[in-house]
Every structure is written in structure tokens, then in C-alpha cells.
């Protein structure tokens, strides 16, 4: 996908999204996002149908072109374009090269909010770390970042790993940020612990018990939500 084709695709993408947009939904979406981002008002199910041609095209481009497309989507005013970028990256995650972690860092730290950061963390960065284990050093760095969205990404990147979760790293990250006052960090730690509790509930209970004074009430409640 060259520059001209990418531009044409963006025009086509906008047309298809606008065809299924709902102004009333847009207002509700913007309120939900605390009026940080304008929206077209496209429901998730409608977006997936409308952007099916885009995802098909994305599978035939180079990874550099894919990242350029994601960046272009991020530059569009309405929030739905960022969701399309997340969908395209997720659909092509097996092809994304290790060197593109810097591009993902840019997306994570630009116009940031949880509803784009979380899918990038769990469905793109996480699988990339599995495919490219050398990238784990980046997570060890990100978890210490002053940027809460990079730290949240590091904490959540193992969320879908199941039995392949590295508990040492999970608990290390949780301890590193246990004293954080930021809601989105506290919530992420609790969510990550809760998910691992499905695999090893005893380990999560012990961790929360040992570090009870360090962990926020929010984190403890999230971690133990389904453990009784």
C-alpha cells in the first residue's frame, strides 16, 4: 500500500464508517470517554462489518505499511479510527516485527486512554513479546515509566497468557507499582492478579496477603474478586 493507495483507503474507510454512524450514539460515546475525543457514533459490531474490507487489505501489505496505516488512523479526529487501527494490528500481530515496538509505544502514548491502550497491551504487545522474547526488557523498562499508559501496558501484557504467564514477572511488576496512587495503575495490577488467579489462586491469595499494606484497596478487591 503506497502513499496514494493509503490515502484512498482512508477516504474509503471514512465513508464506510460514516454510513453506519449514529449522532446520538456519538454523544453517548463522547460522554463515556469524558469528552476527550470526538466520535462518529459507530457501534463496535457495525464497525467490524464496515471495516472488513480494510482488514482484508491490511493482510496484504508490508508491516511497515501496516504501521503507517495505524499511525494515519491515529491522526484522524474521530476515535473510531483508532479502534480500526487496533483491529488491524490485532489481525496482523503474527507478522509484526520486533522493531515495531517503538511504533506501538508511540500509539500507546499518543491520545491515550484505556480503551485503546488495553487492546494494544493485551492483543498486540503481549503476543509480540511471546514471538520475540528479547522484547521483555522493554516491558521491564516500561513498568517503571512515569507514563502511566506504558506502565499499564507492561502490567497487562501477560493478561491473555494463561498458564504461560510468568508469575515472577507478574508479581515483580505488581510490587514495583504497588504504592502508585494512579487509578489506572492500581486497577491494572488488580486485573492482572485476578486473571492469574484463574491459574493459581493460591499464589494470588498469598501475594495479596503478604503485600496487603502495600497494595491499594482497589487492587486487593480486584485481585480477589473471584477468589472468595
Image: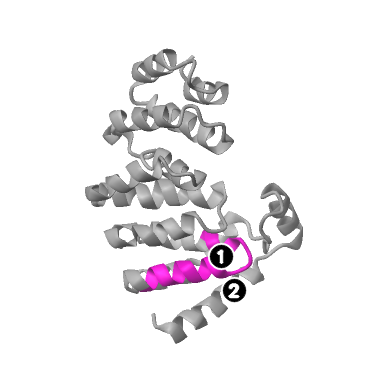
Mark 2 secondary-structure assignment: helix
- What SS does tag 1 mark? helix
Q: Hey, which quadrant is residue 88 in on the image?
A: bottom left
Q: State if disc 1 and disc 2 touch (CB < 8 Å).
A: yes
Tell which tag, 2 or 1, sits nearer the viewer: 1
Residue closer to the observer: 51 or 218: 218
The residue wearing badge 2 is 14
Q: Earlier in the sequence, mark 2 or mark 1?
A: 2
Image height of 128 relative to 2, above or below: above
Q: Which residue is mark 1?
A: 81
- Identified at 27% across, 35% down, the residue is 164
Can residue 215 be seen in the rendering of this structure? Answer: yes
Magenta part, dominant SS? helix
Observer-nearest residue: 112 or 38?
112
Relative horizontal placement of residue 179, taking residue 139 as reference (left or right): right
Magenta span: 65-83
Say whether residue 108 is magenta: no
Q: Is residue 66 magenta?
A: yes
**Quadrant hosting residue 106:** bottom left
Dot 2: few (<14), some (14–19), or many (≥20) neighbours within 10 Å? some
Nearest to the observer: residue 214 or residue 65: 214
Amino acid at each position: 500500500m503506497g502513499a496514494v493507495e493509503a490515502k484512498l483507503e482512508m477516504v474509503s474507510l471514512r465513508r464506510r464508517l460514516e454510513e453506519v454512524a449514529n449522532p446520538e450514539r456519538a454523544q453517548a460515546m463522547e460522554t463515556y470517554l469524558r469528552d476527550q475525543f470526538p466520535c462518529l457514533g459507530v457501534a463496535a459490531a457495525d464497525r467490524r462489518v464496515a471495516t472488513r474490507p480494510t482488514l482484508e487489505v491490511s493482510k496484504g501489505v508490508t508491516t511497515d505499511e501496516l504501521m503507517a496505516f495505524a499511525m494515519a488512523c491515529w491522526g484522524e479526529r474521530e476515535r473510531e479510527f483508532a479502534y480500526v487501527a487496533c483491529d488491524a494490528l490485532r489481525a496482523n500481530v503474527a507478522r509484526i516485527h520486533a522493531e515495531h515496538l517503538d511504533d506501538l509505544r508511540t500509539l500507546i502514548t499518543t491520545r491515550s486512554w484505556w480503551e485503546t491502550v488495553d487492546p494494544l497491551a493485551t492483543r498486540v504487545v503481549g503476543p509480540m513479546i511471546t514471538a520475540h522474547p528479547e522484547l521483555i526488557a522493554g516491558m521491564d523498562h516500561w513498568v517503571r515509566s512515569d507514563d502511566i499508559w506504558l506502565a499499564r501496558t507492561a502490567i497487562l501484557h501477560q493478561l491473555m497468557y494463561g498458564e504461560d504467564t510468568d508469575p515472577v514477572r507478574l508479581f515483580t511488576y505488581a510490587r514495583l507499582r504497588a504504592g502508585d496512587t494512579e487509578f489506572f495503575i492500581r486497577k491494572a495490577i488488580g486485573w492482572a492478579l485476578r486473571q492469574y488467579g484463574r491459574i493459581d489462586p493460591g499464589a494470588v491469595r498469598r501475594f495479596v496477603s503478604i503485600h496487603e499494606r502495600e497494595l491499594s484497596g482497589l487492587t486487593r478487591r480486584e485481585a480477589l474478586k473471584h477468589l472468595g
